[in-house]
Amino acid sequence: MMKAFWIVVVLLVLAADWAALHDIVTGGEPDYRQEWTWLVASTLVLAGLAWIAFRRRRGRRSEGE
């Protein structure tokens, strides 16, 4: 159940990233600070989640050997 929750969270963040990139590319906003802030923050969060997932998976693999 928790795995499905995190998948939904990641998909929602990616959808918001897509919307921010769309605003930047098409010029839909007069000020892009909010879009760039969202992109940087979400990149850091997704990188952190990937790092945690990698560390957990690697820890499980080394325990089984």
Image (tube, rainbow, N blue to C red):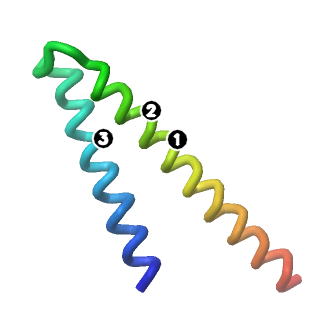
Image location of residue 24, percent across then percent down: 23, 22
Q: Residue farthest to the right?
A: 65
Residue ID for mark 2: 40
From mark 3 to mark 1, how far is it between C-alphas?
12 Å
- Whether pointer 1 and pointer 2 mark residues with C-beta atoms closer than 8 Å, the reply is yes
User: Based on the displayed image, in which of its 4 quarters is residue 49 positioned?
Assistant: bottom right
Q: Residue furthest left?
A: 28
For disc 3, the marked residue is 17
Q: CA distance from mark 2 to mark 3?
A: 10 Å
Q: Which residue is mark 1?
A: 44
Q: The disc labelled 3 sits on which kind of residue?
A: Asp
Q: Secondary structure at mark 3?
A: helix
Residue at 58% over, 50% down: 48
- Label 1: which secondary element: helix
Going from N to C along the chain, the mark reached first, 3 or 1, is 3
The amino acid pointed to by label 2 is Val
Query: Mark 1 belongs to which amino acid?
Result: Leu
Q: Under tag 2, what secondary structure?
A: helix
Looking at the rendered structure, the number of numbered marks drawn on it comes to 3
Q: Is residue 3 left or right of residue 32?
A: right
**Residue placed most toward the observer, 61 or 27:** 27
Q: Position of residue 53 (x, y in %)?
A: 62, 64
Residue at x 35%, y 25% (from the top left corner): 36
Left or right, residue 51 beside residue 37 = right
Mark 3 packing: few (<14 Cα in 10 Å), some, or many (20+)?
some
Determine crowd level at label 2: few under 14, some 14-19, many 20+ residues with C-alpha closer than 10 A: few
Residue 7 x, y percent position in the rendering: 39, 68
